[in-house]
Image: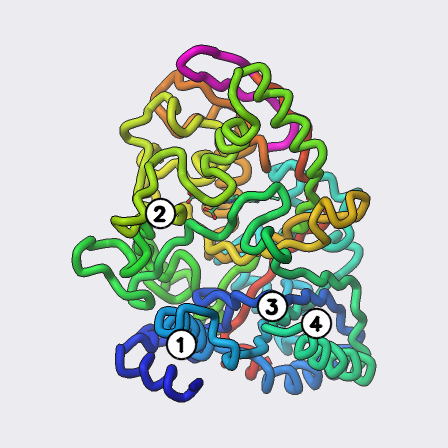
Amino acid sequence: MTELLHLHAERRGVRPPLRGSREIQGNVLAAFNKDHQQFRFVRFTDGRLGRTWLAAMLGHISVTADVEDFNEAFSLGRAMFGADPQSLKATWTNLSLTPAGFAKLAVNPEAVERDLRVRDAELVQGAEARCAVNGDDPEEWRFGRDAQQIHAVVTLASDTEERLQAVDTLLDLLDDLLGVTKVYQENAGTLPGAHRGREHFGYKDGISQPGIRGFHEEDPDRKGHRFGHAGALLVNPGEFVFGYQTERGDEDGRTARWLRDGSIQVIRRLTQDVRGWEEAVEEHARVLGVTSDSMGAMLIGRHKDGRPLASPVDEAAGLGPDRNDFDYADDPRGLLTPCPAHVRKTNPRSFTFRNPRQRRILRRGIPFGPPYEQDPRAERGLLFVAHCTSIREQFEFQQRVWAGNPHFAGGEDGAPTGTDPVIGGAGEARFETSDVKATLTFERYVRTTGALYALVPSVSTLRLL
Ligand code: HEM
């Protein structure tokens, strides 16, 4: 069946036309979408041995074309047979390097650092230097502090736990052999049963993602949107991968050749306090005189099953809970989707001063830890992973200028707003219903417990190191 599905994918012409689809690593433009994932944060003890390790790793790295072909075949199988095609399984690997990792492996570290700095100063500064900007306390970090010197991050993703374990064992042996120290490891995965596809607060995640021009197909009926994904705006590939047209224009002049087809990776370990969140939702629901479900949806901007507050669902018309074809132009004060709601803060759609396509990120996060009711005392959260080509203008902009800024509304001047209750840290936000107006206070229900900025280089660049 695998071959049949691949054949179909090729006939439909879905093989990505983007020039770098065999150069750009998997999980950047084409998501791994695997239930079992492992993140290995490692350090090289010696540059020469590190390069040998890299040479061994090269054979395992997945490229965009393969991941996208698999994902297309999988969706086709689901459409044809009405269920997930059980015989289609894969295990993928992605490898990123920090600036310190490049310095350890490169034969010309000064030139490498200069090229990185020209393209993204924040990447070179590192997440710890940016902690005040992002509202973090590095004392709480399990990984990512400068003193820890992480050089590389290996992301493994597989459909089965068993296959993931097999690669894990292989990599442990390779690390031991070549003096590579594992500084930290996170095992993450899709939550089980009724929690599937949801993050720990219980909301469906991974719905709104940008499409990529020249990689995803354009909907002939809705120019500028991704075919088959109502509401997914097409964004120029240069917003996520170096060496392509960006929304700001062509930035190739600032990009060293070796950076082409590479992408910046932002990793954040976000620990979630589920009990604290649920208690706050209940308490605030009483203040506003609404149900807990409605209150939670007002904080996120979508219901637990994904239904957006901004737009009704009409399954018969093909507009399910995942619908994404809306903006907030007809809701300038946030009466439908409150301005402090997480999805409105991180993507205000019609209410950005500039082209809204310039602030998008590709989100590749996955939960870690068991569901709350399985073990209330265990630690849990989201291993947030995002891709962009400007940390300051994309990820940090969403985090600092929008989510963490109590004055940013994403609505008309004077619209009631406040900090993003999910990622804005402790703060206040103003909510209005047709009957009640109230200022609600929030504790910090999401804490950053690890952070790292890295670069996912092209396959050719990895070969050159
Ligand atoms: C959307 C949860 C962290 C940016 C969403 C959605 C949920 C969610 C439930 C709606 C579903 C969807 O459209 O995918 C969370 C939780 C987080 C977290 C629980 C932390 C534990 C972050 C961070 C950022 C971020 C750190 C970036 C700084 C976004 C964006 C969207 C989104 C851009 C899509 C908004 C849209 O286009 O409508 N998140 N998120 N999230 N989140 Fe988060």
Q: Nearer the viewer, mark 1 or mark 3?
A: 1
Q: Residue 104 shows which numbered tag? A: 4
Q: Residues within 10 Å of mark 2 (few under 14, many from 20)?
A: many
Q: Are marks 1 and 3 in contact (CB under 8 Å)?
A: no
Task: Say what secondary structure mark 3 lies in.
Answer: strand
Q: Residue 22, located in which quarter of the rendered image?
A: bottom left
Task: Say what secondary structure mark 4 lies in.
Answer: helix
Q: Which residue is mark 3?
A: 96
Task: Say what secondary structure mark 2 lies in.
Answer: loop
Precedes in sequence: disc 1 or disc 3: 1
User: Looking at the picture, which amino acid does disc 3 mark?
Assistant: Ser
Q: Nearer the viewer, mark 2 or mark 3?
A: 2
User: Looking at the picture, which amino acid does disc 1 mark?
Assistant: Ala
Kindly tell me whether residue 61 is visible in this rendering: yes
| Distance of label 4 from label 1 (alpha carbons) | 39 Å
| Distance of label 2 from label 3 (alpha carbons) | 33 Å
Q: Which residue is mark 1?
A: 73
| Distance of label 3 from label 4 (alpha carbons) | 14 Å
Please state, as top left, top right, bottom left or bottom right, where the C terminus lies in the image.
bottom right
User: Looking at the picture, which amino acid does disc 4 mark?
Assistant: Lys
User: Looking at the picture, which amino acid does disc 2 mark?
Assistant: Arg
Residue 252: x and y, percent? 36, 64
